[in-house]
Each structure stands twice: as C-alpha cells, then as structure tokens.
Image (cartoon, grey):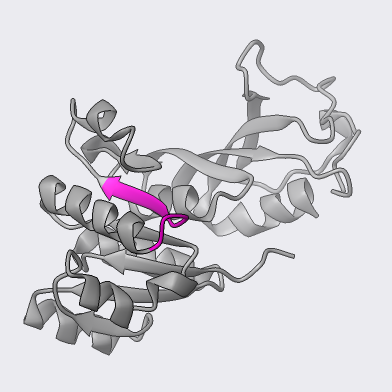
Amino acid sequence: MTRTKRFVIAGGGRVGKQTAENLADQGHDVLLIESDEERVEALSDAYIGPVIHGDATRPSILKQAGLAEADAIAALTDEPGTNLAICMEAQQYVPSIRTIARAETGTEQEYDEVVDATLLPEYLGGDHAADILTGEDIRTLVYPTADLDIIEVSVSPSAPVAGRRLDEIALPSGSLLISTADRTELAGSDTVLEPDERYILAVETDVVDEVLNLMRG
C-alpha cells in the first residue's frame, strides 16, 4: 500500500491547483501557499487542503507551512525566477527536501544543481507534476486528450498479470499495451508481462484505476 505523503505546493494557479487536487485524490496530504488573496479564497473554497496566504520565498512562511515535516515542495507559480528562489530557500531550511520547480523551455538545465526536477511549459499538467512529486512507479508521459493518458508503469511481482502472456490477460476496454519502456518492440499477443519490467500503455481516464490494479496488484 502506498504511504501517505505530505506535500507543499507554492502557487495556486491552474497547475498548482490541479497538482494539489491530484495528490489529494491519491490520498496524500497537501498544503498550498498562495500570495494572491483572491486565489487564496478560491483555493480555500475548493477544500483541497490548508491554504496559507503569503510569499513562499520567506522562511517564516515555509516554517508556518511545516516544511520540515513535508516529503517535497513544488514551486509552481507563474514566475520561474520565483520558483527557483522558493526551492533554494526550502533547501536552506530543510536540506533533504525534494524540490520541483516550474521552469521555462531552455532553462531547465540551469536548474539541475539546484532542484531535483523541473516542469516545463509543454508538460504543464497537474498529473505530470504529481507523478514527479510522489516518485511512484507510474508516470504519465503525455496528455493527448482530456480522456486519454499514455502511462508508463512497472509490473509488481504480485500483480495479477505478472508472468502472463498478453493474450491470457483481459485488459479492460479502453486500454492498450503499447510496448516495453525501452520501446524496442511493439507489444503483441505473445508478449509476457515480466515482473519489475516497465510497460507503456494508452489508457482512457475512466479505466486507469482498473489497469493499475492489474499491473500493480
């Protein structure tokens, strides 16, 4: 069973709010920091988690957010420079904290020595940010439509599909096994789902949980 984690999200705009919602839906504890008073009110009304009105670059605000007890912080404001400053301040306060910063295309490599991961404009989705933060054995690769995800997930040794051929498995309607994670060959009926191997699937949103139960147990 996945351990409940605690995350601090700095920035309550579209990406920050969506990330917080996705993490909360997974059963994690989320606290948001937002400097805009109107956004604070809207976030509070959404009942995602506690919301602090303040500047996340300030140590006093990070202390108020209980950063020392958090697993990770995501700086997802509209200003990449502010996001970098938030992560740097967070690491000064809690050196072991995992950090993710929303960046700009072409600047992500400049962040390598400062943050653990960056979120680029072309991947500005709350699902993608949540995947990075949780560090679980599933990650969403692209978002072709609102109802279809391309995901990469590893097969648990205890999963119902572990060690079985694809033609022996009843994948739910709305899902398709594409390939192994190294993309060396397309999946076929004789593909065996090996334990601890990673696979890429196209999955409609309403059957994601069913597919994950088969792949992960």
Does residue 99 belong to the magenta stretch?
Answer: yes
Residue stretch rendered in magenta on the structure: 94-101
Point 63% across, 35% down: residue: 176
Front-most of 127 and 54?
54
**Residue 100 relative to residue 208: left or right:** left
Front-most of 171 and 98?
98
**Residue 171 relative to residue 167: left or right:** left
Point 77% across, 40% down: residue: 155
> Where does the N terminus fall, quadrant-wise?
bottom right
Q: Image quadrant of residue 163?
A: top right
Q: Image quadrant of residue 38?
A: bottom left
Is the residue 204 above or below the residue 110 in the image?
A: below
Point 34% across, 64% down: residue: 93
Is the residue 197 above or below the residue 58 in the image?
A: above
Q: Image quadrant of residue 31?
A: bottom left
Does residue 210 belong to the magenta stretch?
Answer: no
Front-most of 109 and 159?
109
Is the residue 15 above or below the residue 173 in the image?
A: below
> Where does the C terminus fall, quadrant-wise?
bottom right
Give coordinates of residue 192: x percent, y percent.
Answer: 85, 26
Give coordinates of residue 98: x percent, y percent.
Answer: 44, 53
**Residue 48 relative to residue 3: left or right:** left
Q: Name the residue furthest top.
A: 184
**Residue 182 relative to residue 92: left or right:** right
Is the residue 114 above or below the residue 89 in the image?
A: above
* Number of dots carrying numbers: 0
Give coordinates of residue 46: x percent, y percent.
Answer: 30, 83
Point 85% across, 20% down: residue: 190
Give coordinates of residue 63: x percent, y percent.
Answer: 31, 77
